[in-house]
Image (tube, rainbow, N blue to C red):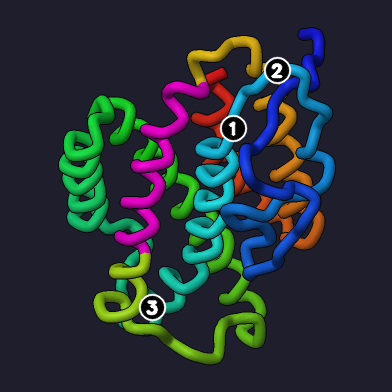
Amino acid sequence: MEYHPTCHRQGHNLSQTVDDGSGVRPGAYPPEVAPQPTRPCHIDGLLDLAAIVAQRIRMSDKVLAAKLGASLPIDDAAREQQVIDRAVAVSRKVGLDPAIGTGFFRVQIEASKLLQRGLHALWSAHPGLAPAETPDLDRDVRPALDKLNDQLLHRVNVTITERRDKFCGCQIQRVVDVITASVADHWDSLHREALQVALAPIREWY
């Protein structure tokens, strides 16, 4: 596909990078994302969405640490259904097709479990790599995850308009690639693989 350097983020400087633990966050992105715009095509929603996906992936470390501390399994069908049910409710609230919201979150759940399984094997083989602190799953971890999940659904809804602008498709693919590369530069292979899985729906939208 021919590259059109036409997308830009309105009112933001994309040449700044901020490391918040996930490697990228809303409002701060690698300089490669900043093109020379000739036609407006705002991609704010996509950039923020990809950044929050990365933050959620990093939360999987705390999820696993909390589960292990409470002797809970990685797979939790009841909790997963709660996440899906909440996704349906929030999707309807923001005007998003619930099928899109739930489909997106099923992928996020699988990406998180993929990472948790990999980390569990790693920590079992090398206990010194496991977190020293054990967060409380219900008090600390899940409320933070629920907040991120709601933010993700709002951003998915925002990107609907952006996705309809096919003129931006190739640039948006490039944005996702650059964000992935920026994060992957200092993430290990387990986290990189999980991030690729989690970002798959975004790539497929374009």
Under circle 1, the secondary element is loop
Q: Is residue 187 magenta?
A: no
Q: Position of residue 14 (x, y in %)?
A: 74, 47
Q: Quadrant of residue 41?
A: top right
Mark on residue 57? none
Give the left or right position of residue 184, taking residue 176 as reference: right
Above or below 114: residue 68: below
> Residue visible at 77% across and 39% down?
33
Q: Amino acid at mark 1?
A: Ile
Where does label 2 land, which residue?
39
Report the magenta residues as a range. Answer: 145-162
> Is 161 part of what is drawn in magenta?
yes
Query: Which residue in the structure is indicated by mark 3?
Result: 66
Q: Residues within 10 Å of mark 1 (few under 14, many from 20)?
A: many
Q: Residues within 10 Å of mark 2 (few under 14, many from 20)?
A: few
Q: CA distance from mark 2 to mark 1?
A: 12 Å
The residue indicated by pointer 1 is: 43
Main SS of the magenta segment? Answer: helix
Left or right of residue 157: residue 119: right
Q: How many marks?
A: 3
